[in-house]
C-alpha cells in the first residue's frame, strides 16, 4: 500500500466495497436454484409440483431485495404474498404488495402487516400450500401484533423504546419482544400448521442465534417465561413499561412461547443465507486484495459496553501494528456495541463508538490511524447516517470549530458532531442488514 494513501479513504472504500460484495439479490440468487419443478436450496430439494399454492412473505430491512430475487426465480408460480419493510429500496416486485412498517418503533402499518400475513396464512393453510418466508433484521418493529388485545400500538412503541434505551443486547430485547407478541417466536408459523414452510434468513444477530432475527417469526426459541421475568427485573423494565403491559406481566394471562422440536419441524426448514461473519470475511478479502493490508478479524469483539469496546479495539490495533512493523494493518470486527441513550440528540452506537475512539486517539497523539464504524443497513440510531469515520485530526478539527466532543456524547448527539465535520457516513437505507462493521486501519 502507498505510504501516502489516505487511511480514512481506505476505510471508507473497504466499507462500501463490502456492501457491494454482500448484495442481497446476488446472495439469494447464489443460494437458490430452480431445475424444472425442483427448488434447490443448499441440500434441500422441494418439488413445486406438489403444491397448488405458493405464498411468499418477506419481512425485514432486506425484504424488498430478497423478494425481488425470489420473484425473478419463481415468477407466476407465486400465488400470493406480502412484503413488509422499513423503506422501499429499488424497484418493488410486481406480484407482491409492499407495506412500510415502522422502525425503530412499530407503526399502524406494522400491525396491519401482521394481521394481513396471519390471515393469508390461515386462509391458505393446507398440505398443498408452500409458504416461503424471507426473514431479515428489523422485522421486530416493522411487523408486529400484540399478544393480548388490551395492548395498544402506543404500548408496543413504549416497550420498544424502553428496550432500545435500557442497555440490553439484541438477544435480550428479543426475549421480551417475543413474549409480548402474537407473531414472534414461531407464532407466525403457527398460523399455517399444515402448510410446508421454508424460511430463508439474512441474520443481524449472533451467528448461532437465528431465533432472534426479527424475533423469530417462524423459528421458536428456547427462552421461557422465567427468562422473560428475569430480564424484566434485570433492566427494571416495570418502571419503564406502560400500565397495560405491566398489568399483563403481573397477570396469569401471559402464555409460554412455542418450543422447538415439535412435530411440525418435519415440514418446516430454515436456511441462513447471509450474516455478519460473511460480511467480515468479504471486508478482510477486500482489505488484502485491493490494498495489500495485513487484515485480522477480531471474532470475539462483538457485544460489550461501548467504552470498553473502544479501549479493547485500540489495544488490539496497537498490538497488531507492533507485530507487523513497516506494514499497514487492518483490524475488523462486527456486531453491536451496547450504548444506552442518555440524551435527546441524533446519534447511534456506531457514531458514538467512533467519537469515543477519536478522543482516545487525541489523548495519545496517534495520527496514523483511521477508524470507521457503520451499520450495514445504512441506519445508525436516530440519525440519517450509517456511521462515521475518524482519525487523529478529528478532535483538533472539532476544537477549532468550537465543538465540545464531551458535550455531544452527554447528549447522545454524535451525528451532529460528525455532520459538522463532514465525517458522517451517509449511505441511505441499503436494503441489507447484517449488523455493524468496524474497520480500523493503522500505519507505523
Image (cartoon, rainbow, N blue to C red):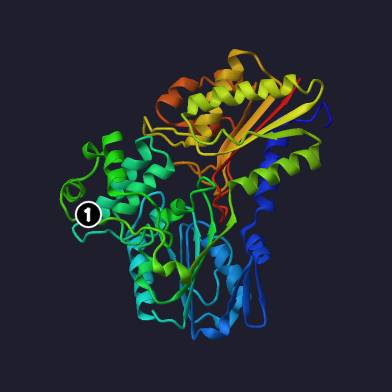
Location of residue 221 (image quadrant):
bottom left
Q: Is residue 119 visible?
A: yes
Location of residue 75 (image quadrant):
bottom right
Q: Is residue 330 above or below residue 393?
A: below
The front one of 119 and 176 is 176
Residue shown at 37% from the left, 31% from the top: 343
Residue shown at 63% from the left, 82% from the top: 37
Q: Position of residue 223 (x, y in %)?
A: 36, 49
Q: Position of residue 401 (x, y in %)?
A: 55, 21
Query: Which element carries disc 1, helix, strand or loop?
Result: loop
Q: Is residue 190 above or below residue 284?
A: below
Q: Is residue 334 left or right of residue 346?
A: right
Q: Is residue 187 left or right of residue 296?
A: left
Q: Position of residue 165 (x, y in %)?
A: 36, 37
Quarter of the image with the N terminus is top right
Give neighbour class at mark 1: few <14, some 14-19, many 20+ (Cα, 10 Å): some
Query: Disc 1 marks which residue?
Result: 254
Quarter of the image with the C terminus is top right
Residue lying farthest to the top in this orientation: 364
Residue lying farthest to the right in this orientation: 2
Q: Is residue 4 above or below residue 44?
A: above
Q: Is residue 423 visible?
A: no
Q: Position of residue 243 (x, y in %)?
A: 17, 46
How many numbered marks appear? Answer: 1
Amino acid at each position: 500500500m502507498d505510504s501516502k494513501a489516505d487511511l480514512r479513504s481506505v476505510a471508507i472504500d473497504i466499507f462500501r466495497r463490502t456492501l457491494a460484495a454482500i448484495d442481497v439479490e446476488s446472495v439469494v440468487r447464489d443460494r437458490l436454484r430452480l431445475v424444472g419443478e425442483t427448488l434447490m436450496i443448499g441440500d434441500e430439494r422441494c418439488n413445486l409440483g406438489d403444491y397448488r399454492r405458493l405464498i411468499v412473505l418477506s419481512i425485514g430491512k432486506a425484504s424488498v431485495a430478497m423478494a425481488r430475487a425470489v420473484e425473478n426465480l419463481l415468477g407466476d408460480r407465486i400465488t400470493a404474498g406480502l412484503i413488509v419493510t422499513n423503506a422501499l429500496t429499488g424497484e418493488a416486485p410486481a406480484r407482491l404488495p409492499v407495506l412500510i412498517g415502522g422502525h425503530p418503533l412499530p407503526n399502524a402499518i406494522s400491525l396491519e402487516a401482521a394481521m394481513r400475513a396471519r390471515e393469508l396464512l390461515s386462509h391458505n393453510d393446507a398440505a398443498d400450500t408452500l409458504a416461503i418466508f424471507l426473514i431479515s433484521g428489523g422485522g421486530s418493529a416493522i411487523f408486529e401484533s400484540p399478544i393480548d388485545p388490551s395492548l395498544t400500538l402506543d404500548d408496543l412503541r413504549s416497550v420498544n423504546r424502553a428496550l432500545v434505551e435500557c442497555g440490553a443486547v439484541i438477544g435480550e430485547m428479543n426475549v421480551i419482544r417475543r413474549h409480548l407478541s402474537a407473531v414472534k417466536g414461531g407464532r407466525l408459523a403457527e398460523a399455517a400448521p399444515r402448510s410446508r414452510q421454508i424460511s430463508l434468513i439474512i441474520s443481524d444477530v449472533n451467528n448461532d442465534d437465528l431465533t432472534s432475527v426479527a424475533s423469530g417469526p417462524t423459528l421458536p426459541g428456547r427462552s421461557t417465561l422465567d427468562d422473560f421475568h428475569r430480564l424484566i427485573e434485570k433492566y427494571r423494565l416495570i418502571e419503564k413499561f406502560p400500565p397495560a403491559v405491566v398489568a399483563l406481566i403481573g397477570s396469569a394471562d401471559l402464555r409460554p412461547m412455542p418450543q422447538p422440536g415439535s412435530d411440525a419441524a418435519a415440514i418446516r426448514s430454515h436456511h441462513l443465507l447471509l450474516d455478519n461473519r460473511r460480511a467480515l470475511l468479504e471486508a478482510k478479502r477486500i482489505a488484502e486484495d485491493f490494498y495489500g493490508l495485513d487484515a485480522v478479524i477480531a471474532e470475539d469483539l462483538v457485544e460489550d459496553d461501548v467504552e470498553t469496546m473502544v479501549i479493547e479495539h485500540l489495544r488490539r490495533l496497537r498490538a497488531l501494528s507492533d507485530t507487523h512493523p513497516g506494514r499497514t494493518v487492518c483490524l475488523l470486527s462486527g456486531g453491536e456495541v451496547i450504548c444506552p441513550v442518555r440524551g435527546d440528540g441524533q446519534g447511534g452506537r456506531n457514531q458514538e463508538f467512533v467519537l469515543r475512539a477519536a478522543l482516545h486517539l487525541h489523548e495519545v497523539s496517534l495520527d496514523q490511524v483511521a477508524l470507521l464504524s457503520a451499520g450495514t443497513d445504512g441506519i445508525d440510531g436516530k440519525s440519517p447516517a450509517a456511521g462515521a469515520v475518524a482519525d487523529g485530526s478529528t478532535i483538533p478539527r472539532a476544537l477549532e470549530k468550537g465543538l465540545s466532543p464531551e458535550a455531544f456524547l452527554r447528549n447522545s448527539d454524535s451525528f451532529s458532531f460528525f455532520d459538522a465535520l463532514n465525517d458522517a457516513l451517509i449511505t441511505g437505507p441499503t436494503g441489507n442488514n447484517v449488523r455493524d462493521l468496524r474497520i480500523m486501519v493503522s500505519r507505523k
